[in-house]
Structures are given as structure tokens and as C-alpha cells.
Image (cartoon, rainbow, N blue to C red):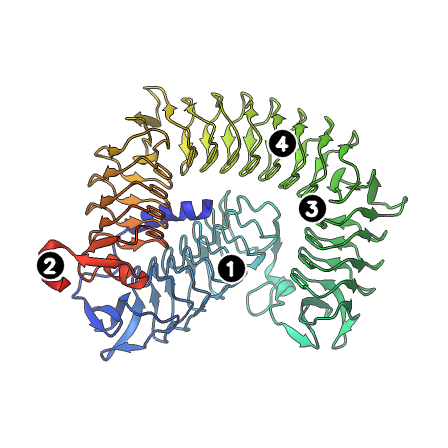
């Protein structure tokens, strides 16, 4: 949800930019709207059709199509594939933004420019090949393309813009061509699946936060001598996939094979030692992922590496044989399998975060007592070099566990899915608790975090449904996103002075009845305390300088938010929380009880989830200073009957009025150029939207089967 929430704001900011094309008379040819540029060529500005697999024409009314204009196909959720014709040189800002069904894009070689946010929010897009003529990836171009797994960058590319691939969480590896010199701010922000990036030595500028949130990332730098003629690092120029029987594979530079996929359906799988004469030395990422037929797998001698997620979600896999040649086992390599036991050979010298996370039947991990790098203590697997607890088997018979003194780290996902664990004692020697370390430990009731911990990582105790209390020590400065999300019995929490950051969704759905935010806090993330239905009031200290989204969304009993009268960044007006710097309405408390609310003049943004679940709200007045209505802004306002959106508004976020079950009358002006997916989903069956002729709103209603009429001055058009 947080990616979607941020997307609404990003799109609103992008839409404030002037159109890249000069004013010209709008023309219509079939399902397309277009204007003519100075050369008489067509620039597509809109589309009214319903094609899922769309082939854009090379000309309209005899005019060659040379550009896809700003927002031309924005929000068209029915689009699944698009082919852009040869001759098009430019794809404008927001051109395909919010096309949530789009899975594939075919670019012609003629394209040289792709605008800001051109494919932002295309959540189904899986692969993209950028044409050779493109020299820069603009800001936010593939923002929030959460399914994007494969990106091919062109020779000649020199720059990757701010947030260009932010929140592309399925992206695992990317190689930059040797022409790239700059990587912008947050370019790969929160690409949590990204494990490897190849940077050529030509890169002279990388923003400090370019890879922020990429917790598993390894960055490798290669010289020009290590690159082939394509400009991409030769050592990972392995995009070509070959097929041999039931197997797909790629080749390393040394000619050995990496198994890429397996298409067979055998119960007993003996992976071959070679494929087409190439020795198999690695099982690649996701090679056997989601296989539902294999029950026993034998990995051949000669394999040295089992990569991340190689066998993840092999739901019937009960037995695996790992040969003595293996030296590396990656994170989640066997996660969510049905393994009951596993033996790890002495050859393994490196092991990622829990390769066996969420293996619900796993009770036994075996290593030799003389293993140089690994040890099993009380049934739990440890890594000796970094003194890291790697894996507590989910089906371990013990319900209470004492971690040995001297352990330095609890690795990522170390206890993931250990539902039978009720108590754990963590020694003071532990200084790091990894991402999702205790995720889904449904039986865990209490935990005491040692004094050496300074950061509680993302999802560390998420979905610990039995957790009733937790002691957070002084010294902790940051509580990560979703750290205690879903701990719905956690009724009390004491945040020590010194905590500066409370991440998005940190305490979402907890049973908190009171909350004291210490003066040290400067940042509170979106949904940090959302769905904490026991909260009735909250005080936000003066040091808070940044709030994203609505930290208190869906808090059903929340009636009061307090800030000081002189707070430099926040204000409460008529019980509603505002952010001063961006003139944003952050939160109308669910239990405020207002039936009618007039948003103050001067407000610029109605933020994400700002009025979400305000069930008593029947009417709201939006002033003409507002330019953006955020994601889920009025979601589940079940008593809201009518809304008039002023002419200042340019964007309406996804699900903005979703589940407003009494909403029957909405007016949308022609100033609105972007309407997000499901903006009016599950509203009253009697909903009628008043729109302007040839407007984005009219097209949106037509595309989504929503009844609409033209404004009073155009009544004759309704006949």
C-alpha cells in the first residue's frame, strides 16, 4: 500500500509541470485524440478505445505519429500490451502511468526520449527493453512497477534519473552500460529484491540514497576492460537462455551452466551434471520456484552455488540432496518448501539469510560437528564467521529458546514462521535483529530486546499475533516499516526517548489504547498506527518535521490529535491535522464525529487516506486551492452522498472514493487530467458523475461503466 500512496503524490507533483507540446487544435481519428506539431506530425493526446493488446497506428488521417503525448493513455487499466509504431521519437510524461494491467511494451528503435513517470504505477509490467537511442532514463519513469523483473538498458545511456526505478521490488539484478555517468537520488529506492548491481567505472556520480532500502544489495564495479562490445559487463552478459530438455540455462563467462528454469513435472528430480556439454555449476534465482510436482531433488556434484529463491515455494518438496561441492546457499533458497530435514555439507562457506524460512515441517538441520563455518546448537543453525543465528527450524519441538551468549546477529527471517515458539531470550551480545526475523511467530507472547540494538528492522516482529508486550531499550533510534504490524494483541508499547523514526505501518493493527510519542521523534510514516482501534487521542511533539500519508488511518476510536499552537510543521484546525510545508490535509480522525466539514481555503493537497473510514461524514466542501486528492482519500466514507471537485484539482488518486456506498452525485471538472485506478469502486449503484465534454473524466466513466452526464450548460448533449 505504501508504494501506491506515494505514487499518488508523485503523480500530482508531476502533473503540475506544463505540457511538453504547444497549444493546438485537438483532432479526433477513430479512438484517438491528437494534435499536430509544427511539422504537421501527429502527437497522440488521448485514447477512447477498449483494446487490451493495442497496436498504435503509424499515422492518423495521413499525419505520421511521432509522439505519445502527456498522459495520453494514463489510467487505462484495461490495457495489457502496447506496440508503439516506428517513427515515434518521444513518449511523454505520464503517458502510460497507472495502466495497472499493462504487462508488455514494444518500443521501436526510433524512440529517443521517454518522459517523467511515463510508466509509473504499471504494476503488472514484467520486462522492459529501452531503445538504443535513449540516452537518459527520466525521473520516476518506472516508479512502482512492482512486477518488473527484467530491464535491458541501451548502449549510450548516460543517466538514470531520480526515483526512476523506485519500488521495483521484483527487480533482482541490473547491469549499467559503460556509458552511464550518473545515478540519481532514490533511483532504485526500496527495490527490496535487488541483490546485485554492476556499476562501470564510468559512473562518476551516484546519489547517496540511490539504493536506499535495498537491504540485500551487493554493488560491483567493473572496468572497461571487463566489458564486451555491447557496453554491458561481460561477466553478467548472460541474458541469452538456452533450452535442453526440461531445463533452461544461461552460460557464465567460463562456459559453465546456470540452471535458469525447469519445466518438468517429475516427482523425483535428478538435476543433470551438464547441459549440452556445459558443466552445471549453479542453480539460478527462482529456477525451480513454485514447482508443485517435485518431492525429492538431487543436486549434482559440481554445483557450487544455490542462488536466492532457487527452490522457493516447492510445496511438495520433502527431501533435497546437497552435494559436497556447494559453497554458497542463498537467502530463501528453499523457503516455503515441505522439507522435514536437511543436511548441509562441510564445503559450504557462505550462507545467506535463512534459506529455509517458512518451511513449516522442517524440524532438523544437520551439519558435522567439525564444520568450519556452521554450527547447530539446540537444533538452531548458526554461522560462525559473523556469529549469526541463521535459522530456527519452524517445526523445532522447543517452545522456549535461549539464544547463546556471544551471538552477535539474528539474521533476516531467522525465525520466520516458527508458530510454536512462545518465548525467546536474546542475550546482550546481540546487536542486530534482521529484517522479518520473527515474522509470523504467531505463538510468541513476550520479547525483551537487548540494549545493544539501535534499529528494529522492517517487519522484524510482524504478524506475531500472540505478542502482548515488548520492551524497547534506550538506544533504539529507528523502528522500521511494519516492525510490529499485525500484532493485534500488543496493547502497550513504551517508546524510549531517542527514537527518531517510526516507519510506515510500524504498529499497524495493534491493540494500543494509549500512545506517548517521545520528543526525539522527527519522522512518522504512513499508516504507522493505522487500524489501532483502541487509540482515542494522540499528541505529536514539536520535533516531528515529516509525516508521510496518514499515520492514523482507520483508527476507529481516534477523536483527538494534539499539536502545540506553535508547532513549526503541523497544525490542527477544527480537529483535523495539517502539514504546513506542503499545505496538506493529513488526517481527519475517524471518531471526530463531524457530519459536515469545510476544508480550509489555502489547503493544497488532500493527502492519502486523509478521511478514510470517516463514517459520519455526509458532506465535504473542497476549496479551489486544492490541486490533488490522494490515494484512498475518502475511502469507506459510507455516509458521504455528494462531492463537487473544484476546477483547481488536476489529479484524483486511486481508490479515492472507493466504498463510499452512499455516494450518488460527483462533479469532476475538465481540469482533472489523471484519475487513478478504482477511484469510484463500490460506490452507490446510483452514482452519476457530472463531467465536461471530451474530458478525462468522461473517458474514465466510459471506460469503467460509470453513469455520467454533461454539465448544465451542455444539457442538450445528454439527450
Q: Residue 148's mark?
A: 1
In terms of depth relative to the viewer, which is nearer, 643 or 288? 643
Horizontal side of 195 relative to 697 (left or right) equals right
Q: Residue at (24%, 68%) from the top-left corner?
A: 33
Q: Residue at (37%, 26%) from the top-left corner?
A: 559
Specify which label sits upstream in the sequence, 3 or 2. 3
Residue 156: give x, y in percent of width and height.
47, 64
Residue at mark 1 to residue at mark 2: CA–CA distance: 44 Å
According to the picture, the residue beneath numbered tag 3 turns out to be 353
Q: Are marks 4 and 3 in contact (CB under 8 Å)?
A: no
Q: Secondary structure at mark 4?
A: loop
Residue at mark 3 to residue at mark 2: CA–CA distance: 63 Å
Specify which label sits upstream in the sequence, 1 or 2. 1
Horizontal side of 466 relative to 404 (left or right) equals left
Horizontal side of 652 relative to 35 (left or right) equals right
Q: Are marks 4 and 2 in contact (CB under 8 Å)?
A: no
- Number of marks present in the image shown: 4
Residue 31: give x, y in percent of width and height.
27, 72
Amino acid at each position: 500500500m505504501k508504494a501506491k500512496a506515494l505514487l499518488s503524490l508523485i503523480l500530482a507533483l508531476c502533473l503540475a509541470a506544463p505540457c511538453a507540446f504547444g497549444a493546438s487544435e485537438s483532432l479526433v481519428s477513430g479512438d484517438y485524440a491528437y494534435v499536430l506539431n509544427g511539422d504537421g506530425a501527429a502527437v497522440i493526446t488521448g485514447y477512447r478505445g477498449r483494446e487490451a493488446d493495442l497496436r498504435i497506428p503509424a499515422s492518423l488521417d495521413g499525419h505520421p505519429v511521432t509522439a505519445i503525448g502527456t498522459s495520453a493513455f494514463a489510467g487505462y487499466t484495461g490495457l495489457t500490451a502496447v506496440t508503439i509504431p516506428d517513427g515515434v521519437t518521444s513518449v511523454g510524461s505520464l503517458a502510460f502511468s497507472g495502466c495497472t494491467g499493462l504487462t508488455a511494451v514494444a518500443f521501436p528503435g526510433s524512440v529517443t526520449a521517454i518522459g517523467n513517470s511515463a510508466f509509473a504505477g504499471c504494476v503488472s509490467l514484467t520486462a522492459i527493453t529501452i531503445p538504443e537511442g535513449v540516452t537518459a532514463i527520466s525521473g520516476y519513469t518506472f516508479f512502482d512497477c512492482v512486477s518488473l523483473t527484467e530491464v535491458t538498458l541501451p548502449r549510450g545511456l548516460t543517466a538514470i534519473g531520480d526515483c526512476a526505478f523506485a519500488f521495483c521490488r521484483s527487480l533482482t539484478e541490473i547491469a549499467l552500460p559503460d556509458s552511464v555517468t550518473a545515478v540519481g537520488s532514490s533511483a532504485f529506492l526500496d527495490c527490496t529484491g535487488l541483490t546485485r548491481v554492476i556499476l562501470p567505472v564510468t559512473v562518476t556520480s551516484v546519489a547517496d540514497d540511490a539504493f536506499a532500502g535495498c537491504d540485500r544489495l551487493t554493488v560491483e564495479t567493473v572496468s572497461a576492460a571487463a566489458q564486451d562490445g555491447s557496453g554491458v559487463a561481460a561477466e553478467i552478459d548472460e541474458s541469452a537462455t538456452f533450452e535442453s530438455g526440461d531445463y533452461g540455462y544461461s552460460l557464465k563467462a567460463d562456459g559453465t551452466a546456470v540452471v535458469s528454469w525447469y519445466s518438468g513435472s517429475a516427482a523425483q528430480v535428478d538435476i543433470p551434471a551438464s547441459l549440452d556439454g556445459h558443466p552445471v555449476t549453479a542453480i539460478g534465482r527462482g529456477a525451480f520456484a513454485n514447482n508443485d510436482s517435485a518431492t525429492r531433488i538431487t543436486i549434482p556434484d559440481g554445483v557450487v552455488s544455490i542462488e536466492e529463491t532457487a527452490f522457493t515455494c516447492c510445496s511438495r518438496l520433502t527431501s533435497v540432496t546437497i552435494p559436497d561441492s556447494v559453497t554458497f546457499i542463498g537467502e530463501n533458497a528453499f523457503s516455503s518448501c515441505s522439507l522435514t530435514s536437511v543436511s548441509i555439507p562441510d564445503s559450504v562457506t557462505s550462507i545467506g539469510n535463512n534459506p529455509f524460512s517458512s518451511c513449516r515441517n522442517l524440524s532438523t538441520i544437520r551439519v558435522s560437528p567439525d564444520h568450519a563455518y556452521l554450527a547447530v546448537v539446540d537444533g538452531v543453525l548458526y554461522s560462525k564467521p559473523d556469529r549469526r543465528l541463521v535459522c530456527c527450524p519452524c517445526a523445532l519441538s522447543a517452545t522456549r529458546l535461549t539464544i547463546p551468549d556471544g551471538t552477535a546477529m539474528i539474521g533476516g527471517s531467522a525465525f520466520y514462521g516458527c508458530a510454536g515458539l512462545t518465548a525467546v531470550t536474546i542475550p546482550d551480545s546481540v546487536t542486530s535483529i534482521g529484517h522479518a526475523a520473527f515474522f509470523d511467530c504467531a505463538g510468541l507472547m513476550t520479547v525483551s530486546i537487548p540494549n545493544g540494538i539501535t534499529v528494529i528492522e522492517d517487519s522484524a516482529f510482524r504478524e506475531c499475533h500472540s505478542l502482548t508486550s515488548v520492551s524497547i531499550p534506550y538506544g533504539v533510534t529507528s523502528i522500521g516499516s511494519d516492525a510490529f504490524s499485525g500484532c493485534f494483541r500488543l496493547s502497550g508499547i513504551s517508546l524510549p526517548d531517542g527514537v527518531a523514526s517510526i516507519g510506515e505501518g510500524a504498529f499497524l493493527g495493534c491493540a494500543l489504547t494509549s500512545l506517548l510519542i517521545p520528543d526525539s521523534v522527527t519522522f512518522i510514516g504512513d499508516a504507522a498506527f493505522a487500524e489501532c482501534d483502541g487509540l482515542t487521542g494522540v499528541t505529536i511533539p514539536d520535533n516531528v518535521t515529516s509525516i508521510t500519508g496518514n499515520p492514523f488511518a482507520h483508527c476507529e476510536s481516534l477523536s483527538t490529535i494534539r499539536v502545540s499552537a506553535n508547532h513549526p510543521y503541523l497544525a490542527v484546525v477544527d480537529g483535523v491535522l495539517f502539514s504546513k510545508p506542503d499545505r496538506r490535509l493529513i488526517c481527519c480522525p475517524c471518531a471526530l464525529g463531524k457530519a459536515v466539514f469545510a476544508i480550509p481555503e489555502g489547503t493544497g493537497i488532500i493527502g492519502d487516506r486523509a478521511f478514510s473510514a470517516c463514517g459520519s461524514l455526509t458532506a465535504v466542501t473542497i476549496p479551489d486551492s486544492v490541486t490533488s486528492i490522494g490515494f484512498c482519500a475518502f475511502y469507506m466514507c459510507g455516509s458521504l452522498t455528494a462531492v463537487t471537485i473544484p476546477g483547481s484539482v488536476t489529479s484524483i488518486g486511486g481508490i479515492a472514493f472507493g466504498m463510499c456506498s452512499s455516494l450518488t452525485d460527483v462533479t469532476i471538472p475538465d481540469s482533472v487530467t489523471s484519475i487513478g485506478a478504482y477511484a469510484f469502486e463500490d460506490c452507490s449503484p446510483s452514482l452519476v458523475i457530472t463531467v465536461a465534454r471530451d474530458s478525462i473524466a468522461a473517458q474514465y466513466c466510459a471506460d469503467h461503466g460509470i453513469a455520467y452526464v454533461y454539465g448544465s450548460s451542455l444539457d442538450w448533449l445528454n439527450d
